[in-house]
Image (spheres, grey):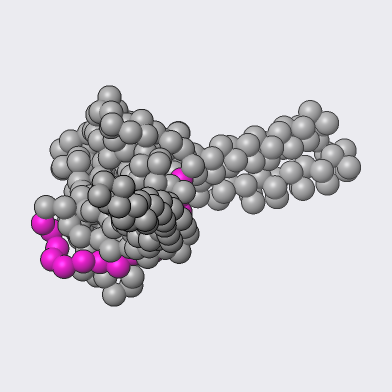
Amino acid sequence: MQAALAQFRRPWLITGIVLVGAYTTWQRFKPQPTPPVKVSIERNISALGRLTPEGGLITLSVPGGPGGISNDVIENWFVGEGAAIRQGQILAQMRSYRQLKSQLAQAESNLASSKILLPFLRIGQTRGAILFQEGAISEQDLGKSVAAVETRKATIDAAEAGVQIAMRQLEAAQIRSPINGSLIRIFSQPGMKETSDGLALIGRTNAMEVWAQVYQADIDRLRLGQAATIRAESGGFTGTLRGTLKTIVGNVSSRDLFATNNNNNVNARVVLAKLSLDAADIAKVKSLSGLNVVVTFER
């Protein structure tokens, strides 16, 4: 009986072993599912920036050199902060202006008086030459008439130089705008000398830019002509502005490029990037020079 049972179990055992082996082989060589592709989500580049007139802010100062009077004070401003200005326009007048105007008038009078006598002296020189040829006067007398003409010519030259100096000094007593733009801020009010910051700040606000400090690690992801959206960091204008990256300044800095204190360091090295604004947006922010903004570059 036991022999019969053994013969009956042996085929099933063999079959089980074969099935287990086949299953193991199938598990080992069955097609493996393809792992899902990991999609890398690239973040947008954001940077802190500042609204700035094209070319930066320009400091007005009392002209230096022979014409400038460093200890002079402001007498009057003819335009106020925020006013539009044009190239060559007189923006302010120094207190010395009236005195210098009087000095110029005196210099011009001296020049005119010097010129009046020269024709008469030349006539005398011509007559002296004739008289000398006739033997009526000595060579010494002729020399005097020639010397009188030369002396008068030297006097005229000096008087002309005096007029030029007086004109330069008078011009220096008037502060003119070198650009078309706006008067942004006045530092020296009437009665004040020029401050350490100059007399005033002006800028080409009719062509505003955004200057942004971009982390050095992000620079290789930027390209000239790249579009960006700009929003105010903490108020100043609503909505967003459109900008275009036009310049990447090569110098790398380890400090906040917009900080007034040069010792203010940032956590990473930054590079200055300049963006132009769409023409439709410039009018919205032309009076907001220096406003902090956040720039987001589009991919």
Q: Is residue 170 left or right of residue 130?
A: left
Q: Quadrant of the C terminus?
A: bottom left
Q: Position of residue 165 (x, y in %)?
A: 47, 40
Residue at left offset 25%, top offset 61%: 230
Residue 140 or residue 218, whichever sits in front: 218
> Magenta stretch mostly in which secondary structure?
strand
Magenta-highlighted residues: 235-249
Please tell me whether residue 192 belongs to the stretch shown in magenta: no
Taking the image as drawn, is residue 56 in sight? no
Q: Is residue 210 above or below residue 62?
A: below
Residue at left offset 79%, top offset 28%: 140
Residue 153 or residue 287, whichever sits in front: 287
Q: Position of residue 31 (x, y in %)?
A: 43, 61
Taking the image as drawn, is residue 112 in sight? yes
Q: Quadrant of residue 298?
A: bottom left
Residue at left offset 20%, top offset 60%: 231
Q: Quadrant of residue 23?
A: bottom left
Residue 233 or residue 40, whichever sits in front: 40
Q: Position of residue 46 (x, y in %)?
A: 28, 52
